[in-house]
C-alpha cells in the first residue's frame, strides 16, 4: 500500500498554485521581469509585502500574473500556452516593445524619470557570470549542451586560477559546475556569482578593475579565444600572406558569433590594422598559418573581453 503520509506538502503545493492565491504567480513574474530588465516591477523581488516598495506598474504585474496562471497568449494568432509556462512568459516579455527599446539616455526622459521607473528606455546591464561563461563556450563552438549527469570537477592551474577541468575539449554549462565554498571558480567569482554561505535573494552587480584583468589574463578566456579563432578561420578560410591574411568575412563572422551583429566600417578597418600588427609580433619562423591563427586568437580575445560581450545593451 505504501507508507502513510499526512499529505501536508501536497496541500501546501496545492495552496501555493491555487488560482485564488495571487501571491505565487506575482512573485514568479516579478523575478523573471527583474532578470530581463534589471529591476522588478516591484523593485524588492524578495519582498512583495506591505513593507516592500510598491510596484511601478501594478496593473501590469497583475495582468502578467493572471496570464501565467491561465496560460499566456503571445499573439492573437497563437493559442494560449499551458498554465504556469515559464518559457511562454520569457517569450512574452522579450517580444514586447518595452524590452526592445534602446538604452541610450534622452535628456527629456532623464529630467522626468531619472530612475527609469516608467521604462522609457532599456537598462544596460551585465549578464550573469554563468551566462557569460556559457556564451564564451558557445561562441567558440565549445559548449557541451548535454543535459543531466554528474557535476564537472574543478582544477587549480599553475597561475592560481580555479577553472573547470577539460574546457579545451568542450565545456559543460555552468549549471553543472561544482560549487565549493573553498574553491570558487575564479571567473564566476570575480563576476559576482553568489557565495554558498548566505541566502541570496538578489545578486550584487559590481564593476571592478579585477574583472577586466581577469578577462584579459584568464586561461579560460584565452582558450575559448583560440577555439573561436580556429572556428572562424575554418568556416571562413583566410588565404594568402600579409594584407591578404585579413578577411572581412572572417571578422564579420567573429562579430556575429560574439556580439550578434556585423561590424561597422570603422570597426572593420580597426580589426584589419590590429590583426596585421599582431602578426608582426610573432616569429616568421613559426609559419604563416600559425601567425594568422595567433593574430586572430588575439582579436577574438579582445571581442570576448569587450563590454559589449558581457553587457546587454
Image (spheres, rainbow, N blue to C red):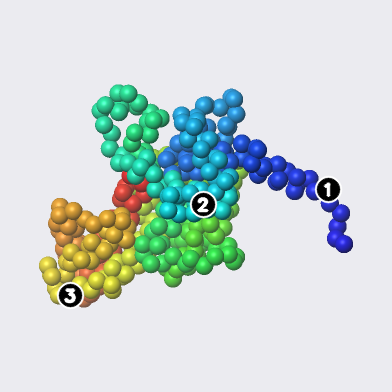
- For the residue pair 209 and 228, the one nearer the viewer reads as 228
Pinpoint residue 50: horizontal percent, then vertical percent: 59, 25
Classify mark 1: residues with Cα within 10 Å, few (<14), some (14-19) or many (20+).
Answer: few
Task: Describe residue 309's horizontal placement relative to residue 205 as left or right.
Answer: left
Task: Describe residue 37's horizontal placement relative to residue 80 as left or right.
Answer: left
Q: What element carries label 2?
A: loop
The disc placed on residue 293 is: none
Q: Mark 2 points at which residue?
A: 80
Q: Are circles 3 and 1 on residues that touch, CB within 8 Å?
A: no
- For the residue pair 60 and 192, the one nearer the viewer reads as 60
CA gap, disc 1 to disc 2?
36 Å
Give residue 218's quadrant in the image.
Answer: bottom left
Q: Are circles 1 and 2 on residues that touch, CB within 8 Å?
A: no
Marks 1, 2: nearer the viewer: 2
Q: Earlier in the sequence, mark 2 or mark 3?
A: 2
Q: Which of marks 3 and 1 is nearer the N terminus?
A: 1
Q: Using the rendered image of the protein, determine whether residue 151 is visible from the camera's viewpoint.
A: yes
Q: Earlier in the sequence, mark 1 or mark 2?
A: 1
**Which residue is painted at 59% across and 24% down in the image?**
51
Q: What element carries label 1?
A: loop
The disc placed on residue 239 is: 3
Which image quadrant: the C terminus? top left
**Which residue is painted at 61% across and 40% down in the image?**
24
The disc placed on residue 6 is: 1
**Which residue is painted at 18% across and 53% down in the image?**
264
Q: Using the rendered image of the protein, determine whether residue 128 is visible from the camera's viewpoint.
A: no
Amino acid at each position: 500500500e505504501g507508507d502513510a503520509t499526512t499529505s501536508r506538502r501536497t496541500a501546501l503545493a496545492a495552496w501555493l498554485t491555487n488560482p485564488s492565491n495571487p501571491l505565487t504567480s506575482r512573485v514568479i513574474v516579478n523575478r523573471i521581469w527583474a532578470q530581463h530588465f534589471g529591476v522588478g516591477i516591484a523593485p524588492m523581488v524578495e519582498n512583495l509585502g506591505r513593507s516592500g516598495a510598491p510596484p511601478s506598474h501594478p496593473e501590469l504585474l497583475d495582468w502578467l500574473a493572471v496570464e501565467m496562471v491561465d496560460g499566456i497568449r503571445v499573439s492573437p494568432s497563437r493559442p494560449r500556452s499551458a498554465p504556469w509556462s515559464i518559457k511562454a512568459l520569457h517569450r512574452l516579455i522579450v517580444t514586447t516593445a518595452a524590452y526592445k527599446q534602446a538604452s541610450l539616455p534622452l535628456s527629456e526622459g532623464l529630467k522626468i524619470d531619472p530612475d527609469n521607473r516608467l521604462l522609457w528606455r532599456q537598462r544596460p546591464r551585465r549578464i550573469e557570470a554563468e551566462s557569460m561563461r556559457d556564451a564564451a563556450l558557445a561562441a567558440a563552438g565549445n559548449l557541451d549542451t548535454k543535459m543531466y549527469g554528474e557535476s564537472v570537477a574543478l582544477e587549480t592551474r599553475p597561475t592560481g586560477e580555479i577553472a573547470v577541468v577539460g574546457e579545451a575539449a568542450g565545456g559543460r554549462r555552468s549549471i553543472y559546475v561544482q560549487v565549493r565554498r573553498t574553491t570558487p571558480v575564479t571567473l564566476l567569482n570575480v563576476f559576482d556569482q553568489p557565495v554558498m554561505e548566505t541566502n541570496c535573494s538578489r545578486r550584487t552587480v559590481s564593476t571592478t578593475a579585477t574583472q577586466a584583468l581577469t578577462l584579459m589574463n584568464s586561461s579560460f578566456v584565452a582558450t575559448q579565444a583560440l577555439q573561436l579563432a580556429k572556428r572562424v578561420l575554418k568556416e571562413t578560410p583566410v588565404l594568402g600572406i600579409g594584407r591578404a591574411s585579413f578577411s572581412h568575412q572572417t571578422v564579420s563572422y567573429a562579430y556575429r558569433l560574439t556580439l550578434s551583429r556585423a561590424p561597422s566600417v570603422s570597426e572593420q578597418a580597426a580589426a584589419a590594422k590590429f590583426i596585421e600588427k599582431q602578426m608582426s609580433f610573432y616569429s616568421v619562423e613559426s609559419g604563416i598559418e600559425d601567425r594568422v591563427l595567433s593574430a586572430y586568437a588575439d582579436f577574438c580575445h579582445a571581442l570576448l573581453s569587450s563590454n559589449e560581450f558581457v553587457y546587454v545593451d
